[in-house]
Amino acid sequence: MGYFEYYNQLHRVHQVDLGPSLGDVLYSSLTLFIPGCGPTRTGLPIWLEIARFLAPIVASYAALAGLYSLFRDRVQQIRVSFVRNHVVVCGLGYVGSVFLRQLRDSGAFRSGLLRRLNVVAIEMDPANPLIEVWRSSGIPVIVGDAQLKRTLHTAGVQRAANLLAVCREDAVNAQITAVARELATGRHRGELHCLARIGNPQLCALLRFREFSRRAIPSSSLDFFNTDEIDARLWLQKFPFFDAGARHAHLLVCRLDGLGTWLVRHAARLWYDANRDVPLWVSVVDDHATERVQALKDQHPALEKVCRFVCASTSHRGVHQLSKDHAAVKAPPLTRAYVAAYRDEDALETALTLRLALDPRIPLVVALSRTQGMGRLISDASAIGEPGHLNIEMFPTLERACTPDLVRGGSSEPFAQALHDRWREEKLAMGEDTPTWDELDASRKESSRAQARDIKAKVQRFGCTIVPLHEWDAPDFAFEPEEVEQLARDEHDRWVREREETGWRQDGGVKMADPITKTTPYLIPFDDLPEHIADYDRDFVRAIPAILASAGLQIKRPPHTDPHEAGITRD
């Protein structure tokens, strides 16, 4: 704008046919960007006046943007020095990025007047393009090895509330949490909750059981998770394979990889709890179906008593032979088909193949790690109603597993949900409308998580341990009446401490808890509670074995243990 207006202006001044030279016009245009060096006389054309004011503004903006880009990383590092109660995410692979995106979109872990996202990321590879992506989103990213104390110290782990280790290697994630807990030793405010991703399902279970058997450390806690295990549970919740009261169920599982194995295990346990006298039929479509089914039964003997397996290959002939195989063994009709694969392309290909071979009335759901790419084919088709004809649905695995709830609750999240569901069923039976888990506010969810995390301490109260549940038909564990009473007393004391720490106060003038004023009539000693309120704590203690069993765990009592010798008191 300034160039052309200067050209016209100088052309009128020179009043010659050749007009001003290119150098004169260019030099005059550049003076617009320097305050005090532009045209000083009045009566200039309107566009030249506009250019005279816009040029310094554009120049200043460009300079500030350049300075911000130059010093942004340093500013973010300084900001890390002041952040508290934040989340440290170690590893900016796809899983780490999904966690960051979920934390950002949910609005969780925000604080301050500007509601900044209280998250700090650590990435070892300086060439990772996601570093710049998240830095531009306002999340500080520290480049370094999270296994080193100085890197974690720079990320402020000694002041953090949560640490999430989601690097590709299991050993690296375990080492990160070990170093973080060492740094957190001796902290006086709050607890550092460490959560490590373990891709090997057997190793994840062993590490978790080992942590269950250890005494709690006041300054930090350690937990492990496996995305396949979580996804299988959520997959069955979102897409159940039988209705309440059903007498027969038959699910198809394509590929017994990590996700498929967990799906069979969770499905078998759900069916066993609902129908112990009727077998669950499971059709396995896998190129090594027979060998993998046998390995699964060897690893988990209870499945052999609960399930009846039909094996088929993923080939065209194997898939189209399924109906004849089912008729030969007199299997009930399929109730739902689940398709998973390591690569999304393979999963979608198999889902389409099965869709053509199976009865179109059989619902089929495919698990995909990414909603982009292959997932767009299904979501786009859903927009025009095509899946209504194909009857194919999509389950986005990582988006469902890598959530803020997992960061907050860890492996105790299913226990917290189970506790709330039991409480909700009691309330509904009394005619009281109560919210579902997803409808709960953050404070009530956290209260359920705290109750679930304390299950470990209650089990250890009498020298008992939590071990894997292998024999599902073994006699159910039950606490002795004296143990129930003591643990109910402990639970009430824990609940009182939790309420007082979060600002609640006693008010005998109200009939029930008020979350708005944070008043309750029950911040009193256990012996002074109304009997029906005390029964809530007793019922919770009695339900602990069933809650653990739903997750494949059981309580073992040491031999010759007398409850009175295990520390039962009335204090």
Image (cartoon, helix red, strand yellow):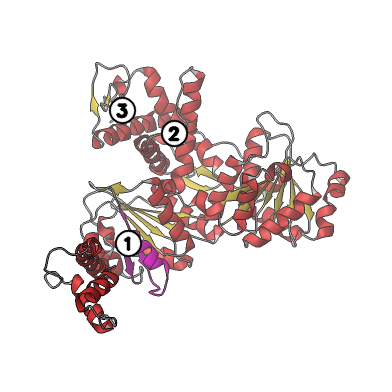
Q: Position of residue 9 (x, y in %)?
A: 23, 72
Q: Using the numbered discs, state the Cα–Cα distance from disc 1 to disc 2 in whole angstroms.
A: 33 Å
Q: Indicate which label's residue lies in the foreground, 3 or 1.
A: 3
Q: Is residue 243 above or below residue 18?
A: above
Q: Is residue 524 visible?
A: yes
**527 left or right, relative to 271:** left
Q: Earlier in the sequence, mark 3 or mark 1?
A: 1
Residue bearing mark 2: 439
Mark 1 Cα-neighbour bin, 10 Å: few <14, some 14–19, many ≥20: many
Dot 1 corresponds to which residue? 180
The residue carrying pointer 2 sits among few (fewer than 14), some (14 to 19) or many (20 or more) residues within 10 Å by Cα, namely few
Q: Bin the neighbour count of mark 3 within 10 Å (Cα to Cα): few under 14, some 14-19, many 20 and up.
A: few
Q: Position of residue 333 (x, y in %)?
A: 79, 39
Q: Which residues are magenta?
A: 117-144
Asked whether 73 or 239 is in front, the reply is 73
Indicate the amino acid at tag 3: Pro
Horizontally, residue 179 falls left or right of residue 168, namely left
User: In the rendered view, would you say 170 is above or below 107?
Assistant: below
Q: Which mark is residue 481?
A: none
Q: Would you name the residue on which mark 3 appears? A: 515
Amino acid tagged 2:
Glu
> What residue is drawn where x is 24% and y is 53%?
84
> Image point 71% across, 58% down: which residue?
349
